[in-house]
Amino acid sequence: MRILHCLLTREFAGTERHVAELANQQALTHDVTVLLERHTADPRTGGDIARHFLPSVRIVRANRAGYLPTLFRVVRSETFDIVHTHLGKASIRAGVLKVLGLMGKTPVIGTLHNAYRARTYGKHDGLICIARWQQDSLPEGCQHQSILIANWTVPSALFPLEQAMLREAFRRQHALPPGAFVICAVGRMVEEKRFDCLLQAWRQAALPTDTYLVLVGDGPERVRLENVCADYRERIIFAGYRSDVPDVFCAFDGFVLPSRREPFGLVLLEAMAAGLPVCATAAGGVLDILENVSDCLVKPDCIDALAAGLVRLRQQPGRTWDLSFHVLEEQALKTEQFYRRFC
């Protein structure tokens, strides 16, 4: 099967990891091409999806004319069995070609990494939802052409000794004392991730003095967040962007996800795969992941609830989670089977 993935982005976060891992898995048995923006490195963090593809995945970049003309050129000059779009910008452009009849008979499938919008996905032949809330919110006419295929997590490839060395190196780098219980939060520092709520909850929780909070990530909110906790920052560490997530989870003892809205929560899966106890807001795809462990869930945008959740988290040991529903190979097979409904 010849597959063309379309993604127009300039960063490396959850969606980009999803696309890279899916394309790499599909390339084991299929001919896979990925159409990217001309420049894909995040100017702030340096994160770049292009570095995460296997050599077997062919990468095409948009030319000077732009993404839409390049997409048109690629689909007219080559034959694909499926065009698979991700996020709004690439999906809208594929939809434009579909409306104009310039896609030929090639089916166009989209993965919803956020909410459904008719302007973005209304002309797609099929839709893949990564969480139940997305599928439940689809217009009635779209339900029959959709499928729910949850996200996955790829376990760390590090050996136990390598994990121990990374844990020690990270803690030494950030002057974390021996025996410290380290809670982490990981993500882009933007308003909807509610790191500000987490910092206020941290202060209110008044956890034991051997407990530390590490924020991994960067973004436009970082300076404001650092100012928010300027007067009580002795046990809060801003570790910056890391390119080795999910490997770095071995350095921590607990994980917290304070987002107001989380389309799926890939970073939550990664923390669970590392055996960490977790505390997460009951929003979006998080409800799918933790539907049977309500003691790990807290109300979104609620400082009191999050503070109480941090207290519970501090008391939890390492945990073995059942992630058998979130295996890349199985989800990639479901994706291929969905493709074949339209080929």
Image: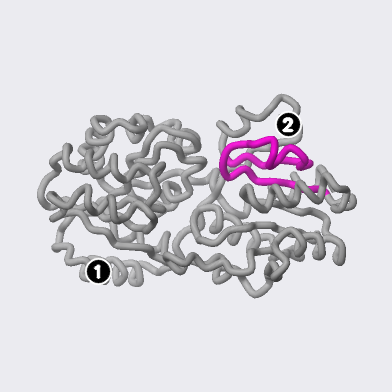
Q: Is any atom of residue 332 visible in this view? A: no
The image shows a total of numbered marks equal to 2
Left or right: 306, with 337 as reference point: left
Disc 2, SS: helix
Quarter of image, res 182: bottom left
Closer to the eye: label 1 or 2? 2
Q: Residue at x 65, y 75 (%)?
A: 55
Q: Which mark is residue 168?
A: 1
Percent across and percent down for residue 185 are 33, 50
Q: Residue furthest top?
A: 140
Q: Residue at x 43, y 31 (%)?
A: 292
Residue type beneath disc 1: Glu
The magenta stretch spans residue 112? yes
Disc 1, SS: helix
Q: Which mark is residue 142?
A: 2
Q: Is any atom of residue 258 visible in this view? A: yes
Of 114 and 270, the residue lying toward us: 114
The magenta stretch spans residue 137? no
